Image (tube, rainbow, N blue to C red):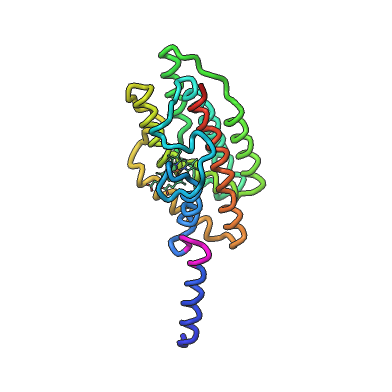
Amino acid sequence: MSLKAVTVSATMTEKAKKRYPGESKGFVEEMKFVAMKLHTKQQAKEGEKEISQPEERSVVKWKPTTEGYLRFLVDSKLVYDALENIVYDAAYSYYAEFRSTGLERSASLAKDLEWFREQGHPIPEPSSPGLTYAQYLKELSVKDPQAFICHFYNIYFAHSAGGRMVGKKVAEKILNNKVLEFYKWDGQLSQMLQGVRDKLDKVSEGWTREEKNRCLEETEKSFRLSGEVLRLILVS
Ligand code: HEM
């Protein structure tokens, strides 16, 4: 390769780095970069969003209720059921790669709801945030696979990070520190997350830059819809 060619390709790498933060490490890193900015500072230190909703305040300040938490668990189950059915049906053959990753949450949520029922708590009917999100995912998974993958990533990875902080704080405040099944994984969570990261990076290698951008642009919607489900914890 001539010196000129080396210089040109070095400049291009530099440009690519500037345009799409995280790109040099793979597409998951790009998705993470976009997601981190959509947190508020009270949620995560890399966050840049202004607080406009109650769940965007520090979890330490939350005043959860058992009724609200149950509504959150019921609606979360709808969302995880939808994700698990979508990868099982695999409208696009590569969705099948995301079956049995170890991150699935439907079965553990079913156990938690059963536990609450045994404790004498009535299990609420599903409500609009979960129904809306589950329906949206079903439709999106068929008509826009790149956008669907954005939700898939954000939902599972959010639960492994902020979701666990939420679970710990809520348990401290209203469950006498009981750790629900929702927050337990069979095996090493870090390894399962890495396995999914590798698959997401591999699948997205075949995407055009436009398809990648469409996926990244969907992040905001993912935060909005997940935020509505999270907000249920705080209903009184
Ligand atoms: C109470 C609400 C939330 C809190 C307190 C929170 C907090 C955090 C924190 C502290 C991290 C960094 C973890 C680390 O670097 O190890 C993180 C990562 C992340 N969060 Fe959130 N978050 C919240 C809600 C959300 C929502 C609604 C979404 C999107 C639907 C989301 C998506 C993500 C993603 C994708 C990551 C990257 C995880 C990874 O790559 O391992 N978070 N969150």
Give the farthest residue toward the top: 120
Magenta segment: 17-23
- Tell me the quadrant of ligand 1: top left
**In this rendering, position of residue 144 left or right of residue 200:** right
Asked whether the viewer can see residue 170, the reply is yes
- Give how far across and how far down residue 54 sits, in percent: 50, 33
Query: Residue 136: within the magenta?
Result: no
Query: Residue 18: within the magenta?
Result: yes
Q: Does 188 sit above or below residue 94?
A: above
Number of numbered callouts drawn: 0
Q: Residue at x 45, y 56 (%)?
A: 29
Asked whether the viewer can see residue 149, the reply is no
- Give how far across and how far down residue 111 sits, in percent: 43, 24
**In this rendering, position of residue 108 left or right of residue 212:** left
Q: Residue at x 61, y 57 (%)?
A: 211
**In this rendering, position of residue 132 left or right of residue 4:** right
Q: Residue at x 59, y 34 (%)?
A: 134
- Give how far across and how far down residue 195 sits, in percent: 41, 49
Q: Does 174 sit above or below residue 7?
A: above
- Give how far across and how far down residue 63 sits, in percent: 43, 26
Q: Residue at x 45, y 48 (%)?
A: 47
> Toward the viewer: 190 or 31?
31
Q: Does 19 sit above or below residue 176?
A: below
